[in-house]
Image (cartoon, rainbow, N blue to C red):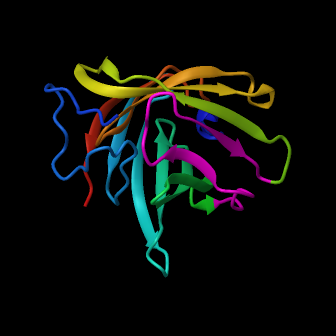
């Protein structure tokens, strides 16, 4: 199994050469719907697909099951929770086996991305080490990946000592999600090759 998959890792329109997919909502930098599928090239080529969803009893949150599959067949499974506050990471695991939930939901991405906004992701499973990443939003810019040009919002990130002191940038495009990462995260450098809308 690919080691990179074992550990985690203002409205900006998409440029004319890469139109917003039909049905995609504006200012949705982490689109989630069953059947959505991303294909990435880079250090660790992989596909990411939303395979399930569960709506809370009060209808205020939706939990999405997302599976990342490497070229070696290794699978990282994550559960993301979407609400009016944004997207949180609830738990992860391998294959069909999920670990216990994080002690506190991890803020994966806020509802909006405004320049200079900051937040943290704290990965606390109850077993050391607890890893913290700090994030800061930068101004939107044009980024070209695999022959497509997107207007994307770069988000700088920095890991603490427990996270190896890594630093990098992830670019988010409205209606597409992550289109590029510099490779300082555990998944390595990656660029979006294809995105297929689900339901």
- Image: magenta residue range: 98-125
Q: Residue at x 72, y 62 (%)?
A: 100
Q: Quadrant of the N terminus?
A: top right
Whether residue 141 is situated above or below residue 59 in the rendered picture: above
Q: Position of residue 68 (x, y in %)?
A: 48, 45
Q: Is residue 121 magenta?
A: yes
Q: In this rendering, would 52 be left or right of 149?
A: right
Q: Residue at x 40, y 55 (%)?
A: 50
Q: Quadrant of residue 18?
A: top left
Q: Nearer the viewer, residue 127 or 69?
A: 127
Whether residue 93 is situated above or below residue 161 in the rendered picture: below
Q: Residue at x 39, y 50 (%)?
A: 49
Q: In this rendering, would 122 be left or right of 154?
A: right
Q: Position of residue 84 (x, y in %)?
A: 45, 60
Q: Nearer the viewer, residue 170 or 111?
A: 111
Q: In this rendering, would 59 be left or right of 149?
A: right
Whether residue 40 is situated above or below residue 89 in the rendered picture: above
Viewer can see residue 188 = yes
Q: Position of residue 149 (x, y in %)?
A: 24, 22
Direction right: furthest residue = 128
Viewer can see residue 75 = no
């Amino acid at each position: 199994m690919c080691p990179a998959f074992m550990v985690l890792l203002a409205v900006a329109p998409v440029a004319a050469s890469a139109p917003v997919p039909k049905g995609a909502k504006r200012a949705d930098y982490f689109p989630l719907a069953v059947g959505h599928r991303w294909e990435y090239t880079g250090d660790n080529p992989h596909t990411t697909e939303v395979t399930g969803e569960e709506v809370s009893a009060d209808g205020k949150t939706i939990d999405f099951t997302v599976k990342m599959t490497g070229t070696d067949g290794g699978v990282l499974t994550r559960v993301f929770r979407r609400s009016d506050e944004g997207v949180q990471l609830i738990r992860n695991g391998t294959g069909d086996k999920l670990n216990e939930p994080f002690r506190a939901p991890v803020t994966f991405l806020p509802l909006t991305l405004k320049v200079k906004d900051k937040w943290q992701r704290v990965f606390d499973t109850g077993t050391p080490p607890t890893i913290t990443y700090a994030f800061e939003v930068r101004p939107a810019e044009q980024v070209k990946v695999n022959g497509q040009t997107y207007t994307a919002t770069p988000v700088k990130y920095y890991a603490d000592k427990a996270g190896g002191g890594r630093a990098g940038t992830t670019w988010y495009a409205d209606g597409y999600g992550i289109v590029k990462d510099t490779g300082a995260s555990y998944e390595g450098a990656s660029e979006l090759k294809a995105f297929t809308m689900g339901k």
